[in-house]
Amino acid sequence: MTNLIRRFRHLADAIPTGTMSVGLGIAISSIASYAFVVVSLNSLQGDATAAFSAFWAVVFVIGPGFFLPLEQEVARALSHRRAQDLGGRPLVLRAVRMAVILTVVLVVAVLAATPWLSREIYRGDDLFALSLSLSLVSFCMLHLTRGVLAGLGRFRAYGELIAIDAIIRVLLAIGLSVAGVDSAGMFALCLAVAPLLTLPIVLLRARPHLATGPEAPMSELSVNIGWLLAASVLVQLVSYAPLLGVNLLSSDADQAIVTGFASAFFVARVPILAFQAVQGTLLPKLAGLAGAGQHDEFRRGFNRLMSVVVAIAVLGTLGAFIAGPFVGGILFKDFTMSAGSLALLAAGSGVFIVALTMAQALVALGDHRVTAIAWGIGCVVSLIAMALISGLELRVDLGFLLGSAASGLTMAIALRLEQRKMASTGIGALVDAIEHEPIEL
C-alpha cells in the first residue's frame, strides 16, 4: 500500500503544472456547450430551430477551422522561444497582424455571401449576419489568446479560458430563455459575445507577460500552417456535414425533417461529449507519463486511449438505438427521429472520434500533411455518398458515417506505417496534440 501511495505521489509530481486545469477545462466546456445547445433549441421553434443549428455548423467550420491553426503555431513558436530564453513579443505582434488580415478577409467573404447564407441557412433572420461576423472577430481573439497562454506555459489560465467561455455562453442562453426571447439570431449572438466577456476575466487574473526579443520572420509562424489550416477546416466540415447537408439538400416538403434533425444531431453527438470528457480526464495521466520520463509509453498510451474511444463509439451507437428516442424526447421538445436513424447518426459520431484520435496521434508524430489529406478524403467520400443516396435523413447519416470511416481508414494505414516513429516519440507530443485540438460539439 505504501509503495502504491509513493508511486501515485511520484506520478502526480511528474504531471506538468496546469495539465489538470486543461483537462478539467475541456471537460467543463464540453458539458456547458451541450447545455447551451439544449437551452437554445428548446427556446426556438420551427424554422428558427433549423436556422440556429445550421448557423452553429457554419460558425464552427469557419471559426475554429481557420483560427485553431494560428493558435497551434503561436503556441509552438512561443514555447520554442521560451525554451531558448527569448522574448516573444515580436512573435505575438506578427501573429496579431496575420490574425487581423485573416479576420478581415473572412468577414468580407461572409458579408459577400450573406444573401446566399440568408436564403439557404439563416431562414431570413438578418441578425445571423451580425452574429457570424462578430463571432469571427471574437474567435480570432480567443484562439490567439489561447495560443499565447499555451506558449507561455500558462495552462491553468488556458483551461480557465476554455471553461469560462462555455459557461458564460450557457448563462447568456438561459437569460434569453427566461426572458422569453425566441429569436434564433439572438442565441447565435451568444457565441460571439461570450469570448469578449471571457477574455478580460481570464487575462486580468493571469496577467501574461511578453518580453521583448528578436524580430520574428514569417517562417517562424508558418512551419506547418498550410497543412494545419487545411486539416482544421476539413475536420470541421466532416464533423458538421450532416447539419450542413440536411439544410442545403432539403426541399420545402422536408421542413419537418430539417427541424427535427437539429435536436437529433445533438443527441447523436453524445459520444463526442463523452470523448471530450474522457480525453480531459486522461490528460493528467498521459502528461504524468511524459513528466516521469516514460517516453516509450507513446504507443501504450495511444492504444489505451483508442480502447476507451472505441468503447465510447460502440456504447454510444447501442445507446442511441436502445434509449436514444427516449432521451431525445426528454432533452428536446421537437425530437422526432427513429431509433434506427439515430443509431446510424451516432455511429457516424463514434467513427468520427476514432478518426480524430488517430489524427491527434499523427499530428503528434509530425504528419500534418497526411492528416489533412485524410480529412480531405473523408469530405469527398461524404459528398459522393450524399449525392448518390436518396432519402434526406439516410443520405446525410450515411454521408457522415462513410466520410468519417474513409478518413479513419486512411489515418489507420498511415499510423501502421509509422510504427517505428511511434517507438521513438515521447508521449508528451500526444498530450500537446490533445490539449491544442479540442473539438467543438
Image (tube, helix red, strand yellow):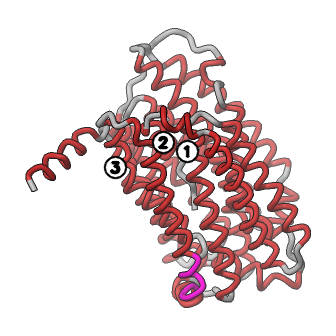
Q: Secondary structure at mark 1?
A: helix
Rendered image: mark on residue 285 = 3
What is the spatial separation of the Cα atoms under label 1 and label 3, in whole angstroms? 16 Å
Label 1 is placed on what type of residue? Ala
Q: Is residue 417 above or below residue 243?
A: above
Q: Residue at x 38, y 30 (%)?
A: 208
Q: Crowding near pointer 3: few (<14 within 10 Å), some, many (20+)?
A: some
Is residue 391 on the magenta stretch?
Answer: no
Nearer-N-terminus badge (1/3):
3
Nearer-N-terminus badge (3/2):
3
Rendered image: mark on residue 430 = 2
Q: Secondary structure at mark 3?
A: helix
Mark 2 touches mark 1? (CB < 8 Å)? yes
Q: Residue at x 80, y 62 (%)?
A: 382
Drawn side of residue 249 relative to residue 135, left or right: right
Q: Crowding near pointer 2: few (<14 within 10 Å), some, many (20+)?
A: many
Drawn side of residue 398 relative to residue 81, left or right: right
Q: Could you tell me residue 142's position as x and y percent?
A: 53, 43
Rendered image: mark on residue 12 = none
Magenta region = 317-324
What is the spatial separation of the Cα atoms under label 2 and label 1, in whole angstroms? 6 Å
Q: Residue at x 70, y 60 (%)?
A: 404
Rendered image: mark on residue 361 = 1
